[in-house]
Amino acid sequence: MAPGLPTAMDRPHFIGIGGAGMSGIAKILAQRGARVAGSDSRESATAESLRALGATVHIGHAAEHLADDSTCVVVSSAIRADNPELVRAAELAIPVVHRSDALASLMGGLRAIAVAGTHGKTTTTSMLAVALTELGLDPSYAIGGDLEGPGTNARHGAGDIFVAEADESDRSFQKYDPEVAIVLNVELDHHANYASMDEIYDSFETFVGKVVPGGTLVISADQPGAVELTSRLRDLSTLKIVTYGDSPSADVRVHKVTPRGLTSEVTVVLDGRYLTFTVSVPGSHYAHNAVAALAAGVALGIPAHNLASALGKYTGVKRRLQLKGEVNGVQVIDSYAHHPTEMTADLEAMRGAAADARLLVVFQPHLFSRTQELATEMGQALALADASVVLDIYPAREDPIPGVTSSLIIDAARRAGADVTAVADKATVPDVIAGMAKQGDLVLTMGAGDVTDLGPQILARLSN
């Protein structure tokens, strides 16, 4: 049986409760019986889903939203020191708990699988959550996106397995003690927190070092950063390493990935035997995520053939190549990709799924720091599309950096031969796309910001 509620978390207040990571923890606490409260900057479906679980959700941030009898205040790294609720917590001497510590407390006493990597965490965590649920193991899970089927990003299960997305962006993944750790890839991102690849490797090595004695690391045998991380690991006496990928030396070797429209058929070689299963997302990138999930489940002692069948029940995560609709022969698909590697993977996946279609992209850069460091690579990725619309940078938690604008990406894209249009007013995008799109085209809204809101608006404009 899953453990109960940590005493310090029985009346938590979440600042930014609507965020992907924060809302998941809040949902699990509410399902475990906590009196959950919190605030967020705007109304959302997430806020409504939390209220349905009994949580109190305030819109806007104000000191009076924090109840005097709250047992803790939960924050993420995005919350600024001058937030009025955080200031009020200090006045009342209410303990402040980072999101990662709250999640670590929920995983205590359970067999945890922590999924890490610069890309693919949400998809892989989701695949495991769906497969383990399908097998009747009733896992708990906390994911950075809503599953298509259950429509939620988190659940408290009665089983003894907890699957969690482990975020490296602020080093918070170093708080967990998993039985199985997955490292999908290691690249330089989150430039406000990491100055070099050496810092990234050190951070991932610390994460791997927290695997419980006798536990397992599942890691890519192909991705250069993951291979380098494996070579840097020093104390391997209590750790089992299982590699996966295309490499002939991989413990779980990807033999073949066969595109089937918006799905893929995957064949792997495991313990000398061939195993074939279907994944309901296109592209090699997502197929490899499924293989990582398979290897992690096997590490927990679940039969591979059962897992392979259950992985076929995965139908996707919102914002991960999610089909938003089709009007007049034009499909609109939403992609969360915001790093060049992710952008390239999703664009190549769509090319493989619909080789004869024209690919139109609406891209919204995410973060000034990321754009400053990776504008050239983002522009090169956009060259894979037939035409792109590039919006202004979505700042999220960051202040502007002088000289850093979307024009850096646009210039790089044009140097790479891309057809790019700059659009400063997001509200005009549906009209712009309606003027470009023809029957048979695919339109991708791409980015980690509010570009996702444009999908329904584009569909509505196309219908007119």
Image (spheres, rainbow, N blue to C red):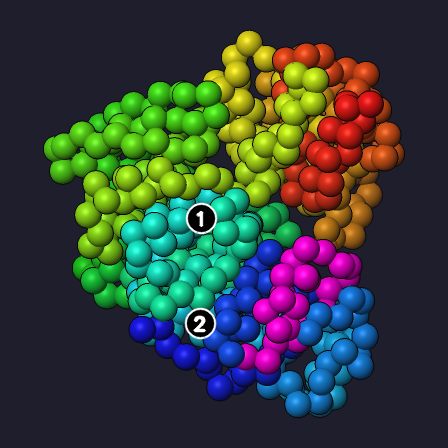
| Looking at the image, residue 111 lies above or below residue 374 | below
Residue 97 showing in the rendered view = yes
Q: Toward the viewer: 43 or 220?
A: 43
Q: Residue at x 65, y 58 (%)?
A: 46
Quarter of the image where one finds residue 12:
bottom right
The boundaries of the magenta stretch are 34-55
**Mark 1 crowdedness (10 Å alpha carbons): few <14, some 14-19, many ≥20:** many
Tally the marks: 2
| Looking at the image, residue 341 lies above or below residue 17 | above
Q: SS for tag 1?
A: helix
Q: Toward the viewer: 180 or 302?
A: 302
Q: Is residue 158 left or right of residue 165?
A: left
Q: Quadrant of the C terminus?
A: top right
| Looking at the image, residue 168 lies above or below residue 428 | below
| Looking at the image, residue 252 lies above or below residue 440 | below
Residues at marks 1 and 2, CA–CA distance in whole angstroms: 18 Å
Q: Residue at x 86, y 30 (%)?
A: 428
Residue 173 showing in the rendered view = no
Queried whether the magenta region covers residue 51, the answer comes back as yes
Q: SS for tag 2?
A: helix
Under mark 2, the amino acid is: Leu
Which percent across, then down, holds residue 73? Answer: 63, 78
User: Disc 1 or 2, which lies upstream in sequence?
Assistant: 2
- The residue under label 1 is 126
Q: Residue at x 63, y 61 (%)?
A: 49
**Mark 2 crowdedness (10 Å alpha carbons): few <14, some 14-19, many ≥20:** many
Q: Toward the viewer: 145 or 342?
A: 145
Residue found at the very far left of the displayed protein: 272
- The residue under label 2 is 106
Q: Is residue 7 left or right of residue 246?
A: right
Which percent across, then down, holds residue 120? Answer: 47, 42
